[in-house]
Image (cartoon, grey):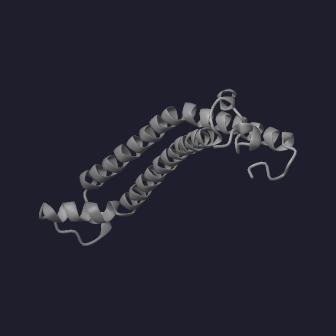
Amino acid sequence: MSYISEKQLPFGSIVISRYLPYEVVLTYQTITFEFIVLSSVVVDVFFASGLAQLSIQCKILQKSIRTIIENSIESARQDKLVIDTISDVPWKYLQKEIEEVVTRHKSIIELGGEFEDITNIPALAVFIGMSAGFCFIVYQVFMVSSPFFFI
């Protein structure tokens, strides 16, 4: 086994590394790095999936708005009314469809507001953490004498 003084670690040396073999410290750093990356990816995927869900809900709402008249005509015909033109549809059927669409729209707006409230702080934390990590990486790159410090 080789010790730290003979090789450099990819993420810099840590205080405990003087007393442990190189392979143990390297394994520790690699596993820690994987968990940090995984946690960042999970948070980013959560943001993307939430926005995708809101987008899909808006597309469903858009389709509902386009089909208000057809749905009103269908509801009136189910009640055995004779509908020849759009103007023959009674207001109560149109009103019912419009109320459903407006209610769905309000729900989507509330969902978007809740999603924004939930994701504000985590998004800021990820941004600050990634910025700090980037600063440390740039600092480490400039402090290493060899361009191939991980060999």
Asked whether 75 or 37 is in front, the reply is: 37
Q: Splitting the image into 4 quarters, where does residue 123 fall?
A: top right
Q: Where is residue 71 in the image (x, y as percent from the top left)?
A: 27, 62
Residue at 52 percent of width and 36 percent of height: 119
Q: Is residue 37 above or below residue 66?
A: above
Side (left or right) of 60 relative to 137:
left
Residue at 44 percent of width and 53 percent of height: 58
Q: Splitting the image into 4 quarters, where does residue 128 fall?
A: top right
Q: Where is residue 17 in the image (x, y as percent from the top left)?
A: 67, 32
Side (left or right) of 137 relative to 87:
right
Q: Is residue 66 above or below residue 136?
A: below
Q: Splitting the image into 4 quarters, where does residue 126 fall?
A: top right
Side (left or right) of 112 relative to 139:
left
Q: Where is residue 77 in the image (x, y as percent from the top left)?
A: 17, 65
Residue at 32 percent of width and 46 percent of height: 99
- Total count of labels: 0
Asked whether 131 or 113 is in front, the reply is: 131
Asked whether 11 or 105 is in front, the reply is: 11
Residue at 43 percent of width and 58 percent of height: 59
Q: Among all residues in the image, which is located at the extreme bottom? A: 84
